[in-house]
Image (tube, rainbow, N blue to C red):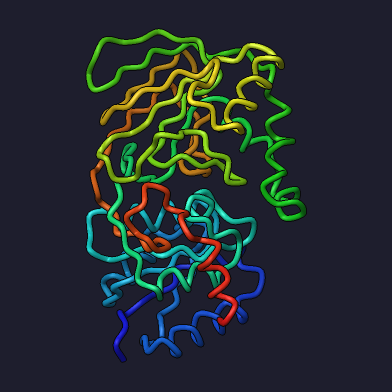
Amino acid sequence: MTGPRSAVVFNPVKVPDLDELRQIVGDGLEKAGWPAPRWYETTPDDPGRGQAKQAVADGAELVFACGGDGTVTAVVTALAGSDVALAVLPAGTGNLLAANLGLGTDPATGLEVALEGGRRRIDVGVIDDRCFVVMAGMGFDAQMLEGTSETAKKRIGWLAYVGGAAKHLLDRPMRIRIRLDGGPPMPRRPRAVIVGNVGRLQGGVRLLSKAEPDDGKLNVAVLTPANLAHWAALALAVLRRQERVPLMETYTASRVEIYSNRAQARQLDGDLIAPGKTMKIHVRPKALLLCVPQPDTDPDLATDAEAVAERAENL
């Protein structure tokens, strides 16, 4: 066997057909000359962090994360700072990291990415004792997640978030202060503050057009729409990939502190965390070894993902 020892950390709730997944992964690795993987099932009490740590202790050199955003974030937290690679096997309606890798919802494509050998050391954001690789947010984006049902996501995929967003478009703005790299506090009344390492939302929409995954900086977007016309103008500019987006301030920093006068909805990589009045985030440069489509040096992690998907049909 010539390939690395691997493990699969999977969420049984998100995997529609576990037998099929085992066959895809097992057959694909065997054909490539890799050892058979070990399998670790997540639980409601541990969405993947403990399982990933156990996989590393058992000798894994590469860990496949298969589940929703919570599973991927937990595995990222366990692997950050190590030389163990992370590969994403999309499951269910997919997740934010899979969207930024261009993987869709097909686990075979994620497997093909790992087999082809594209590896990239990327930054991770840290809040308290948890890591994220895509984006953290306070305000509207987290409210949208709260308002989106699992049933709707299973039926129509990422489009379900449109309904969740519509429920909160006219909510009142937050009253916050933002500090970047220890600078003076900046008072703002936004609808959302998003701190990102890479730029895509669900559906492949690129919100942070200048975000690079390994520049040692986090990108901060402060969104201040006040009515439906403002939301429409902002959304249109994002979809058109305009250089300047109205009603959205952007900054870069290695440390970001957000203080609110009241508890706000919060999220990490599309996974809700407890509401809170603060978010204190810092970056860990190049802390995660990630399996990415080739070429693995392009700022866009999803470069050539469509070609990988075509090759994955053989799996």
Tell me where residue 313 sits by quadrant.
Answer: bottom right
Q: Relative to 75, does residue 107 appear above or below in the rendering? A: below
Q: Residue at x 37, y 86 (%)?
A: 34
Q: Position of residue 138 (x, y in %)?
A: 49, 27
Q: Residue at x 46, y 29 (%)?
A: 194
Q: Position of residue 308 (x, y in %)?
A: 51, 68
Which of the image's four quarters has the C terminus?
Answer: bottom right
Q: Relative to 311, does residue 287 appear above or below in the rendering? A: above
Q: Position of residue 255 (x, y in %)?
A: 27, 28
The foreground one among 151 and 231 is: 231
10 vs 36, left or right, is right
Tell me where residue 107 sits by quadrant.
Answer: bottom right
134 vs 105, left or right, is left
* Count of numbered badges drawn on the protein: 0
Q: Residue at x 53, y 51 (%)?
A: 99
244 vs 78, left or right, is right
The foreground one among 134 and 144 is: 134
Q: Position of residue 286 (x, y in %)?
A: 24, 49
Q: Residue at x 36, y 87 (%)?
A: 35
Which of the image's four quarters has the N terminus?
Answer: bottom left
Tell me where residue 177 sits by quadrant.
Answer: top left
